[in-house]
Amino acid sequence: MIKILFFARLKDQLNCSGLNLEINDLDNQSSITIRKLLDYLFNKNPSWQSTFEHQQVFIAVNQEIVGRETTIKDGDEVAFFPPVTGG
Amino acid sequence: MINIHIQEADFDHSELYNGLRSANTPPGAVVTFTGLVRDFSSHGDVQAIYLEHYPAMTEKTLHKIAVTAQERWQLENIVIVHRVGKITAREQIVFVGVASLHRKEAFQACEYIMDYLKNDAPFWKKEITPTHELWVENKKSDSEALDKWR
């Protein structure tokens, strides 16, 4: 299972705080890239694509910032969020 | 020693300061920074802010920033406290305190930790005004602040 999380403005825009996916739902391989994961999500939820494309979205895999070509596998936690504004 | 706290409750500045002073090697300098909620923004009067975070990543990121500061300067103690949830205007949001043998290290490390916290720690602020709630945009000046540490 892959745990997917959305935070802050992105969570509000998608009206979704997260979801769980089985890696077999995504591809017939044991690992896929973030880019492919996003293609899958956009395919399931067509309105999400423009939400992602109209702003800067950071990606973290297992709480480390990564890029879209990073490969994920079963058990990973993938988070998507806007630029941070703490402090 | 590194101490990191993410909490809804307010914090006691003097208690944190006294904690920073106690170290195996008594420090010669303590520098602290406290961030407060402003009661105005470009959108008008701010009554409160709501602070969301990514719990699993927040503490990990702050710890990594503190460790990097410790590698860069000789520091005795580092304390980082960041509040989450709803915080009323003029209240305290964040505390960064650094104890060191010398003031220069303490000043620099405190600013370094705050600069990286602003850019890397997964917190998001939403402003609550009498008429609306708006997610705060990140500032270019915050990312440019990192240039001096590279």
Image: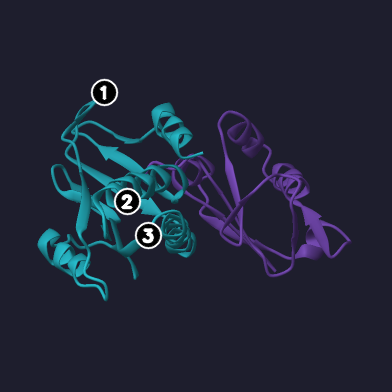
Chain colours: A purple, B cyan
What chain does badge 3 belong to?
Answer: B
The residue shown at (21%, 69%) is: B26
**Mark 1 or 3 closer to N-term?**
1
The residue shown at (32%, 44%) is: B111
The circle drawn on residue B105 is 2
In the picture, residue A78 is in which quadrant?
bottom right
> Could you tell whether B80 is left or right of B19 in the image?
right
Residue A87 visible in rendering: no
Residue linked to disc 3: B74
**Mark 1 or 2 closer to N-term?**
1
In the picture, residue A76 is in which quadrant?
bottom right
Q: Compare residues B42 and B111 and report the one nearer the observer.
A: B111
Amino acid bearing label 2: Glu
Amino acid bearing label 1: Ser
What chain does badge 2 belong to?
Answer: B
Q: Is residue B99 above or below residue B128?
A: below
